[in-house]
Amino acid sequence: MYASENVTMARGPSARTRVLLIDDDERLNALLSKYLGQFGMTVQAFTRPEPGLRALKSDPPDLLVLDVMLPEMDGFTVCRKVRETSRIPIVMLTARGDVMDRIVGLEIGADDYLPKPFEPRELVARIQAVLRRGSAIADAGETLRAGTLEISADTRSARHQGKDLGLTSAEFELLWLLVRNRSRVLSRDRIMDETRGIDWAAFDRSIDVLVSRLRQKLGDNARRPTMIRTIRGAGYVFIGGSGE
């Protein structure tokens, strides 16, 4: 029998990924806790946002799975609160399946978005893809520099003119890809392939949303860009660093 507020699975010797789940559906929490456990994940699940946020702060997990429709505080508000202090990867769930919900989720810092109902195996694949992308970059152990922009693979962070940009995982991965391929035009298809795991195919605006967020944090002007240029009909190219 699972407790109504907190579902915690014992961590076995092979379980390495710690997942925090916030969803008001107790049956779903119990199902996912058991299912994810088969894939080397331990799950701490909450049906209310505030206890979940306290758990995230006191014992940060590797990834947060967050429902949009929550009591007391919706998932978008929870996501914003998390992003004030943490870059933890976030996969959001929604029962509404609204395209705008997905766009808003990306705009406020979610890394991936999965509409309900879904197969548990798909959630496992999304979680693994998000974490794998992060591990691949970290394993590279590189630091990329372009003028006053510095991107660290080890800390998954970026600084511009000495200021931490506070990037989400999705923003970091896109910026890493663009800077690593500076002066090369990357098509949307190429970006989709390289950042697999984010549900790009579900809505065309998602890449544009992340580019817009990057430009805002970099202080770049879309009309007269000095960092990221849009090539109409082709994609995006990073041009920063050469003239700084």
Image: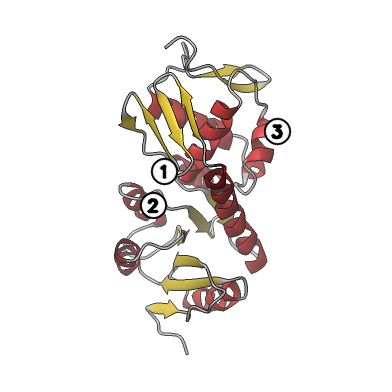
Q: Say which residue appears at 56% left-offset and 77% top-offset.
A: 31
Going by the numbered disc 3, the residue's amino acid type is: Asp
Of circles 3 and 2, which is in front? 3
Residue hosting label 1: 108
Residue hosting label 2: 79
Which mark sits nearer the N-terminus, 2 or 1? 2
Which mark sits nearer the N-terminus, 3 or 2? 2
Of circles 3 and 1, which is in front? 3
Going by the numbered disc 1, the residue's amino acid type is: Ile
SS for callout 2: helix
Which mark sits nearer the N-terminus, 3 or 1? 1
Q: Is residue 167 above or below residue 83?
A: above
Q: CA distance from mark 3 to mark 1?
A: 23 Å
Q: Which mark is residue 189?
A: 3
User: Is label 2 in contact with label 1 (beta carbons under 8 Å)?
Assistant: yes
- The chosen color scheme is secondary structure
Closer to the camera, 237 or 208? 237
Closer to the camera, 241 or 201? 241
Q: Which mark is residue 202?
A: none
- Seen in the image, is 198 located left or right of residue 11? right
Q: Position of residue 151 (x, y in %)?
A: 45, 33
Q: CA distance from mark 2 to mark 1?
A: 7 Å
Q: Position of residue 35 (x, y in %)?
A: 60, 75
Q: Position of residue 196 (x, y in %)?
A: 65, 45
